[in-house]
Image: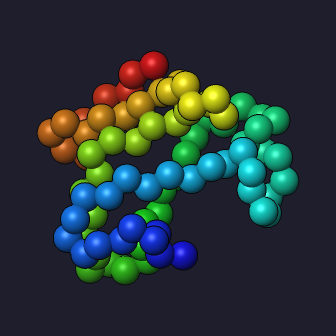
């Protein structure tokens, strides 16, 4: 679903609370997640800019953050 704060050509912060899913069981809360994949669109002509991606605990404490400072090929993970 499109976020309620969606605005074309504007920066947005998107957040998904994986601790209270409506499908998929408890994988995000009872297992160790070793990989994530983000598919923002299925359109080959769409352009996206991602400044950072952060994974946090249910308490909101960041466990790892990736900053895209120069290009998507130079991910920098911090934890």
The image position of residue 29, as x and y in percent, is 76, 38
How far from the left and from the top, in percent, is residue 3?
46, 69
Residue farthest left in this picture: 70
The answer, for residue 75, to whether it is visible in the render is no
Is 35 above or below relative to 6? Answer: above
Question: 20 above or below 32?
Answer: below
At x 25%, y 58%, the residue is 11
Identity of the residue furthest to the front in this view: 5
The residue depicted at 72 percent of the width and 45 percent of the height is 19
Would residue 53 be visible to someone looking at this image?
yes
- Specify the color scheme: rainbow
**Is residue 36 depicted above or below 66 in this figure?**
below
The C terminus - image quarter: top left
Residue 22 point in image, percent of width and height: 78, 62
Residue 28, quarter of picture: top right
Of 13 and 38, nearer the camera is 13
Question: Residue 9 location, x and y as percent?
Answer: 20, 70
Q: Residue furthest top?
A: 79
Q: Residue shown at 24%/69% (left/top)? A: 47
Residue 25 placement, left or right of 4: right
Q: In this orientation, which residue lies closer to the viewer: 73 or 77?
A: 77
Q: Quadrant of the N terminus?
A: bottom right
Where residue 31 sits, quadrant-wise, is top right
Q: Is residue 62 left or right of residue 18?
A: left
Q: Quick one: 2 or 48, which is closer to the camera?
A: 2
């Amino acid at each position: 679903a499109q976020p309620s704060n969606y605005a074309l050509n504007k920066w947005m912060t998107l957040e998904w609370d994986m601790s209270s899913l409506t499908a998929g069981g408890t994988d995000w809360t009872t297992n160790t997640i070793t990989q994530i994949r983000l598919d923002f669109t299925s359109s080959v002509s769409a352009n996206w800019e991602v400044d950072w991606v952060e994974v946090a605990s249910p308490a909101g404490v960041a466990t790892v953050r990736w900053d895209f400072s120069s290009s998507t090929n130079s991910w920098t993970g911090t934890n």
